[in-house]
Image (tube, rainbow, N blue to C red):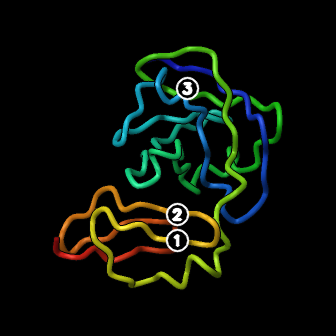
Amino acid sequence: MQFVKLIVAESMDSEMSGFVRIHEKVMEDLGIGEEGFVEIEYGGKKVKSSVMPHLASERIIRVPLSLRELLRAGTGDEVVVRASSVKEASLVLLSELPDLSLISLLRGRVVNRGEKIRIASRVIEVLECQPESSAVISERTRILCGKN
């Protein structure tokens, strides 16, 4: 495992700033697939961040809200990501997630694997769904999975 410095290419200050989008090339270079994790370091703190399977195709990872300094990182700031394979890359904070008021309407909805859910102008496909479990769409919203 190595550490790579990623430059924050675009900063945001919304409630959804815990989500980040990684450029496709970076996703490949870091060896991040539909499942896995990266370790992010900023301001001397390290935290493991999971790759959410249902968002992996959009190259989105979630930065735990406990890493407050990273959430306040501005354009041009450097963060450090630990990964198995490393090349020069940049990190773009995601700024186009759906409105929280719309996403919250899905709370408790039952879905099945392969189902596509439209939220605002985006469509999220349920890539992995275990019976009686839930697919996480945001920190605040879980969608209940069906039994197929």
Residue under label 1, please give it: 118
Tags 1 and 2 touching, CB below 8 Å: yes
Q: Residues within 10 Å of mark 2 (few under 14, many from 20)?
A: few
Q: Nearer the viewer, residue 25 or 48?
A: 25
The residue sitting at 75% across, 62% down in the picture is: 14
Q: Quick one: label 3 or label 2, which is nearer the N terminus?
A: 3
Tell me if residue 75 comes above or below residue 144 in the rendering.
above
Q: Quick one: label 1 or label 2, which is nearer the N terminus?
A: 1
Residue under label 3, please give it: 26
Residue 75, percent from left and from top: 83, 37
Question: Is 90 left, or right, of 119 in this rendering?
Answer: right
The residue sitting at 45% across, 45% down in the picture is: 56
Q: Residues within 10 Å of mark 1 (few under 14, many from 20)?
A: few
Disc 1 residue type (three-letter): Arg
Residue under label 2, please give it: 123
Which label sits in the foreground, 3 or 2?
2
Quadrant of the drawing holding the C terminus = bottom left
Which label sits in the foreground, 1 or 3?
1
Farthest right residue in view: 75
